[in-house]
Image: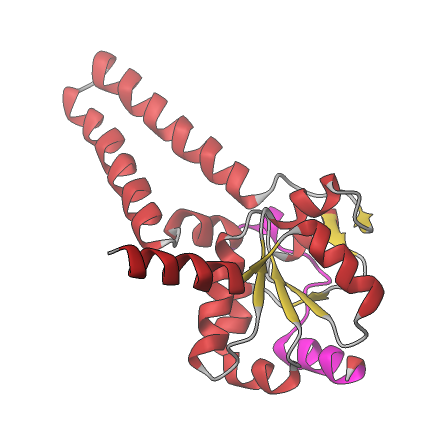
């Protein structure tokens, strides 16, 4: 049991990178490629200068094509690390095992004094998920008291969904919200454009 835990800790360390290490890499490694997998609106609101925008859904669908354009020093970025970890697994499944996830996401990088580009945009997707889930639970409790007790089942459904989300490290609500108009940018790249951007870097 001790051996498994040790190996698991080592593997986790190899698959992630902290903000201070990333800023050091930027100064010393010309082959560094930072891939931001958030929505277009999130990317426009705040992103690491020089990063490439490849939304998670796009990367998931074209993982093999994107992996072929990436080098060996790849850092995947999202708001907190969850979506970036999903992207890492997709790339790993097609043979790119060296990609790392930025721990704490763009927020941690900005807090560490990293070079970011700021704009205007909606709340981060994780914050939207918390607000939506919390609002639905609150509404269901109020409705159960004043309309019908059966409406309280909605709160249980939300709880089950959040539990499943944590267990699988995925978020159906987040995926749904990412498709909402306010989370989509008119400048969001197509897969062809995103691949061309990586070609230009290479």
Classify residue 51 by image quadrant.
Answer: bottom right
Residue at the image position 59 percent from the left and 64 percent from the top: 55
Query: In this rendering, is residue 135 above or below 59?
Result: above
Q: Is residue 178 found inside the magenta-colored segment of the image?
A: no
Q: Nearer the viewer, residue 78 or 155?
A: 78
Q: Position of residue 183 (x, y in %)?
A: 60, 50
Tell whether 199 sits left or right of 2: right
Q: Looking at the image, is 167 positioned above or below residue 131?
A: below
Residue 47 image offset from top left, x and y in percent? 73, 53
Residue pushed farthest top? 146
Q: Which residues are magenta?
A: 179-200
Residue 196 higher or lower than 33, as above or below: below
Please state the total of marks drawn on the protein image.
Answer: 0
Q: Quadrant of the C terminus?
A: bottom right
Could one spot residue 13 in this view of the protein?
yes
Viewer-nearest residue: 99 or 63: 99
Q: Residue furthest left?
A: 150
Front-most of residues 129 and 83: 83
Residue at 51% across / 59% down in the picture? 13
Dividing the picture into quadrants, the one containing residue 21 is bottom right
- Say if residue 50 shows up in the picture: no
Q: Residue at x 68, y 75 (%)?
A: 194
Q: Is residue 189 magenta?
A: yes
* Residue 131 image point, x, y percent: 48, 31
Tell me the quadrant of the picture where the N terminus can be found.
bottom left
| Residue 109 spot, x, y in % from top left | 70, 47
Instruction: State the scheme by which the image is colored.
Output: secondary structure
């Amino acid at each position: 049991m001790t051996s498994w835990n040790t190996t698991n800790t080592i593997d986790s360390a190899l698959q992630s990178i902290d903000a201070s290490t990333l800023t050091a890499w930027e100064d010393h490694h010309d082959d560094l490629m930072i891939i931001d997998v958030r929505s277009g609106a999130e990317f426009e609101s705040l992103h690491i200068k020089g990063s490439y925008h490849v939304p998670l859904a796009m990367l998931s669908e074209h993982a093999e094509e994107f992996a072929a354009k990436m080098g060996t020093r790849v850092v995947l970025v999202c708001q907190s690390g969850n979506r970036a970890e999903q992207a890492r697994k997709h790339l790993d499944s097609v043979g790119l095992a060296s990609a790392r996830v930025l721990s704490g996401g763009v927020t941690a990088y900005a807090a560490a004094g990293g070079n970011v580009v700021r704009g205007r945009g909606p709340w981060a997707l994780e914050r939207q998920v918390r607000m939506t889930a919390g609002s639905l639970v609150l509404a269901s409790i109020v409705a159960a008291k004043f309309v019908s007790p059966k409406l309280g089942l909605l709160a249980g459904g939300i709880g089950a969904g959040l539990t499943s989300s944590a267990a699988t490290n995925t978020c159906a609500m987040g995926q749904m919200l990412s498709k909402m108009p306010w989370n989509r940018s008119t400048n969001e790249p197509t897969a062809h454009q995103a691949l061309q951007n990586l070609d230009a870097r290479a």
